[in-house]
Structures are given as C-alpha cells and as structure tokens.
Amino acid sequence: MRIIADLHLHSRFSRSCSKDLTISNIAKACELKGINMVGTADALHPEWRKEIGELLELRDGAYYLKDGSSKTAFILSTEVACIYKRHDKVRRLHHVLYFPDLEAVDKTITALNERGRNLRSDGRPILGMDSEDLLKMLLEIDERILLVPAHAWTPWFAIFGSKSGFDSIEECFGDYSKYIYAIETGLSSDPVMNWRISALDNVFLISNSDAHSCNNLGREANVFEMEKPSYDEFRRILIEHDLSKFLETIEFFPEEGKYHADGCAGCKFWCEPEKSKKLAGRCPKCGKLLTIGVLSRVSDLADRDPNPTKPISAVPFRHVVPLKELIADSFGKRPQAKAVILEYERMVSLAGEFAILLDMAEKELLELTSPEIATGILRMRTGNVCVRPGYDGIYGEIHVYADEDRSKQVGLF
Ligand SMILES: [Zn+2]
Ligand SMILES: [Zn+2]
C-alpha cells in the first residue's frame, strides 16, 4: 500500500509548540490529511515518553493507539539539538532520531541522563555533544537507531547551515558518515536544489513537516510503498537505498520556506544570491549583515549548475501548497478566516487532504468544490504559481491566483 509518512514534528512539550499537540489529536489530524505513518516526536522527554507508553502499543512493526480509535501508525522519533565546538567553531545542528522500540528510547534516555543532559526542559533537548559522538553512542545502544540531519540547509541550526554547520557530511560525522543514509531537505530547499551537490547523490533526501501545531502536519512528507507501516521496512529502505519502495517526496515550493532567499527581516529587504554578493552581504537599508538563505548556501557548495538533471539515485518529488492556503487564496482571505476553515473542513471530511491535492482528477475536484478552488489545485500541480520568496525568518508567499482572477468570482459561497 502507499504509505504517506511525516516523520519530523513536535509535541506540546517542545518550545513554542501548540498545546493541541497531544497523541490523540496528532492521530486525528493524520487521518484528515491522509498521513498513514507519523513520528511520535519528542520521545526522549520524560512526560511525553510516559504518555507514549500509556497510550501507544507496538503492533506488527509500528506503534498504534491502544484504544483502537485510529489507524495512524507511529514511529518513535525525536529531534535533538547538538551545540558544540569543532575545529574552533561553534556548531549548532538539529538531528532527527528514530528508534525501533521503547527499549531503545529508554536506554538512550538513561545514557543521556548519565552524561548529565537535561531532557526535561524541552521536547527537543539540547545536547552539548559532537554529532559524531552522539551517533556513535546511539549505535552502541542499538544499531537499529537512525540519525537524519534535520532541515539540512537552514542558516542557524543545520548540518549545512551558513551560520552553524559544515560543508560536507564527512566533515561533520567523520568515520560515522557511512551511517548517514538520508538528510532532510527542510522547507526552504527542494530536491532540485540539493541535486546540485553531487556528494549528496548517495543519500536519500527526505521531507517532513517539522510541524509545531496539528495544522501544519504533512506540509512536507515521504511516500513509500510498504505492505504495512513498519519501522524495520523504513530503515531497510534507507539503508539499502531502495528506490523501488521510496516512491516520491512531497515538497513545499522552496520559496515558501522562511530562509530561502537572503534578507533582513527588520528592513523587509530580500535579494537573490548574486545581489547579496554585490552588496558584500550587507543590508542596503540598515547596513547590518544579511541572513544568508538556503539558496545562497546551496550555490556556494554546489558543483553542478542550477536546475541539474535528476541523478539516477534520486527519488522523484512533487510540489504542493497546503489546501487551506489554496482555499484562502481563491477567497482572497487569510488561511485562518472562518470561511476558509469551514470549506477546508467540509472538503477533508469527504476526502483526505493528500487525496485532494495529489490524486483527484479534475472532474472529481469539480464535484467536490468550486471551479476556482479546483483550478487552484490544478495550477499548483503544474507549478503555475506566483512566488514571493521567504527570507530571514519570514515565510514566502505562493499564489495560484492573480488579483484580477479573484475579482471575477464574487458571491460564490
Ligand atoms: Zn529543528
Ligand atoms: Zn536591514
């Protein structure tokens, strides 16, 4: 069966995350979106770990709600922050960890407690540990544990981040690089951008939502072919680089991410990499250093030209815009507007969000919703969108309608 998997999100115990992130709410949201397999997030946090143990049980390869109220499969996961010095520079990296079972989670908690790490203050714990040492420790605990560098290109907290990271997987993980089977592209980069770096041809580029609220679940995801949701099969696909079972990834338009272009949020100024080089990396309005975005950083490390052909070892992908944003765009309203939420809820109660965004034929879309929303979905599928890129922590904007389209559709609902 086709398994849509979102494997990086947070619980309500992570800093600046919504209180709605309970296990049962996550399971419910996954059903509405059409996500089959989801990370538990935050598995090393003592209180959340306790809830996981109380509410979920291991059944046939994945964890499920004991009360049987949802078909959503959970994989034990967490994000950790590693902040440490290497080669005289401070490194700040986020990694996503995956565990085969609760025993491996508990052994990891014990090992980190013994090293005096504080797991209680944040669902995404800060470990003052070198990434290579962390991976070594995890593999000694259980060789089935996986580590995937998170949102690999974001400036502040990532393996290739302009302010925080390294120039290669080898520089970061040394002898343990061979255990890095995948990196997460993050919202601000997509596979085509990553294909410019030939050194990444032998790792999978995975995509997850990094959701801080149920609403954002599945904004990026991975699509696998599996008999059933399964940790072991997920691990096998990564380790064996099994292209026949990793069907595709679902991606944001990378311009929509918060760190795509270079810019200065205070001055609402953004620019492309060439321009910021001409400006010597300084904001022309306030003179401060620009935050160098993902596009610049990828160009700096690239050994291939922009828009390279797809490497044979790469997984196909599709760009999507969250359905709520498409509805909002067709109404000319914000995604939080009442009318938008009502139409969204009506639509996803009839078909899962991913079925609507990815699968439904034009005729079915027209039966489900208005011609304008259906048109928006079709335009998204063909990449017929207008873009204002994100920069310096400000999300980009993607529009499927120009203002003149919208003025034609009064009194629809
Ligand atoms: Zn992170
Ligand atoms: Zn400025």
Image: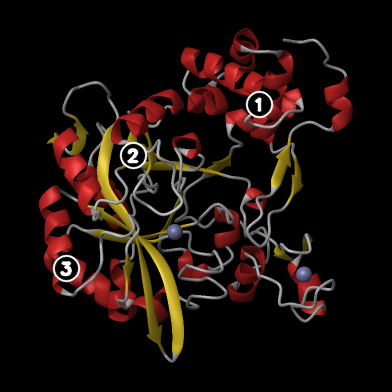
User: Would residue 143 be seen by someone viewing this image from the given angle?
Assistant: no
> Of discs 2 and 3, which sits in the foreground?
3
Residue receiving disc 2? 38
Q: Is residue 241 left or right of residue 231?
A: right
Residue 286 point in image, percent of width and height: 80, 74
Quadrant of the rendered structure where residue 377 is? Answer: top right
Q: Can you tell which of label 2 and label 1 is closer to the viewer?
A: 1
User: Which element type, helix, strand or loop, lies under badge 1?
Assistant: loop
Earlier residue among tags 2 and 1? 2
Q: Which mark is residue 113?
A: 3
Residue sitting at x 65%, y 19%? 339
Whether the residue under disc 3 has CB within 8 Å of ligand 1: no
Q: Which residue is mark 1?
A: 337
Q: Amino acid at mark 3?
A: Asn
Give the Cα separation between the discs numbered 2 and 3. 27 Å
**From the viewer's perspective, is 331 left or right of 84?**
right
The C terminus lies in quadrant: top right
Q: Nearer the viewer, residue 302 or 400?
A: 400
Q: Residue 79 location, x and y as percent?
A: 35, 57
Sequence-earlier tag: 1 or 3: 3
